[in-house]
Image: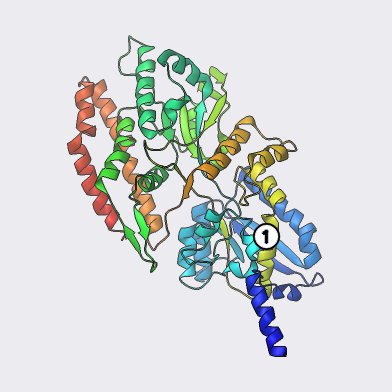
Amino acid sequence: MKRFILALCVLLCVLSGCAKKHGAALLDPKSPVTVTVWHYYNGIQQTQFDEMVRSFNETAGAEQGIIVEAKSKNSVGELADSVVASVNNEPGADDPPDIFATYAETAYQLDKQDMLVDLSQYLTAEERAEYVEAYLDEGSLGQEGALKIFPTAKSTEVFILNKTDWEKFADAAGISYDDLTTWESLAEVAAQYYDYTDALTPDVPNDGKAFFGRDAVANYLIVGAKQLGHPFAEAGVDGSVTVNADKDTLRTLWDNFYVPFVKGYYAAESRFRSDDAKTGRITALIGSTSGATYYPTEVTINDEYTYPIENEVLPVPSFTGCEPWVVQQGAGMSVLTSDEKTEYACTVFLKWFTETDRNLTFSLGSGYLPVKKAANDYAAIEARSADLAISDTMLSTFRVATAEIASHQLYTSPPFDHSADMRDYMESSMQGAASDCEAARARIAGGEDRETVWAEYTGDEAFEAWYANFSTGLKAFQ
């Protein structure tokens, strides 16, 4: 009978989705366990995170016997390098953290060494159901049901438009926001804008302005290829990854980014496109939702001329006839293997941090998107924002982003041994358009025929040469 009762209890536990809780018995408020967290937040995001940690330590942490100590590693790259150095005991490295913010590429490498805790054992089925499913899927690292990256703060991309300058152009050209919904029509609008601004100074030929720029060109390529039906990296059922370079897909991607870039319709001069928008170099951009705090509210042409602008936030364009996709990004938190008490304490903090109202507070203060379904509701965000000093642009960013999450497919490329290197390669390959644009501009300024020069850089022969180099380099990451 005792065996039967025990078996029944185990079965009921499994069916109800019980989470591993016996670590709680090890916690003692009189002898608290210290949990270290490494992150990459800076500025307002770090301030917001530090405030959340302080609040936890004074409330739930004090009650249960957990002290969280947070440390910023300044950037994603520095954080990843620091974590790897610490777990490998490299000379001069700090002691490993208990929790660290991470993207899938770094977590994948550490998980291959069995260094990450499967956090799914600490979540009930009901708790898992509260989170956006795509965020949990990314954190599984391809292992069904596992959770190696706990979703804490996510982001996607939105289209930001300098509405003040747009309206003058749109009225003159007879166009509307509907002309910004596809990559093909965006390129056409950018060409019109170049001609429109060129005509403003008829005595100076070929001085049209760029309309658009985007951060993270790799996102354009990766999500675009997925949308066009031929993703660059595909994971097999056995965990292997196949690298693809479909020619027709790459031609479409090339035609709608490289070509308008070389012709001067797109631009990238500063480190971030928000900086280009601040100086009036571009009128529209695509950036991360987590960068919404940096979108300009004025344009500075020179030391003597600055004017205020109003922004409009719109969805990211899609390719004509394709299902809409947007990138899923933003680091989650992974826990390094240690002891049962520490691992349990880590999950207590992570679940506390992502509680709906609390996660909303952090998201609205930092620009990141909340990770629970209930918090990814614009009505809830708008209501919560009433208590916080949120800019109109920030609020509009959340409005569009939550709508994208609800109506678009979310995509993140599967991690594998060389996925981070492949992403860097793709970014640099397409960004070669910047140097080609300068070369073409110099030749045109030197008296060469504009259409002839453009044809040399953007014609079939140019694409064939670029594709041969790109595909060869891409397949080296297989």
Instruction: Label 1, secondary structure: give it.
Output: helix
Q: Quadrant of the N terminus?
A: bottom right
The residue beneath circle 1 is: 351
Residue 469 appears in the rendering: yes
The residue at the point 23 percent across, 33 percent down is 457
Residue 11 versus residue 45 in the image, above or below: below
The residue at the point 38 percent across, 24 percent down is 189
Between 48 and 398, the one lying in front of the other is 398
Q: Position of residue 309 (x, y in %)?
A: 56, 22
Residue 4 versus residue 117 in the image, above or below: below
Q: How is the image coloured?
A: rainbow
The residue at the point 67 percent across, 60 percent down is 351
Q: Is residue 114 left or right of residue 186?
A: right
Residue furthest left in the image: 461
Residue 92 appears in the rendering: no
Q: Position of residue 402 (x, y in %)?
A: 58, 41
The amino acid type found where label 1 is placed reads: Lys
The residue at the point 38 percent across, 44 percent down is 224
Residue 49 versus residue 184 in the image, above or below: below
Q: Position of residue 347 (x, y in %)?
A: 66, 65
Q: Is residue 191 left or right of residue 65?
A: left
Q: Is residue 417 left or right of residue 279?
A: left
Residue 425 versus residue 285 in the image, above or below: below
Between 283 and 137, the one lying in front of the other is 137
Between 11 and 414, the one lying in front of the other is 11
Residue furthest top in the image: 203
Query: Badge 1 local density, few (<14 within 10 Å), some, or many (20+)?
Result: some
Q: Quadrant of the C terminus?
A: bottom left
Q: Is residue 457 left or right of residue 30?
A: left
Marker count (numbered): 1
Q: Position of residue 97 (x, y in %)?
A: 60, 65
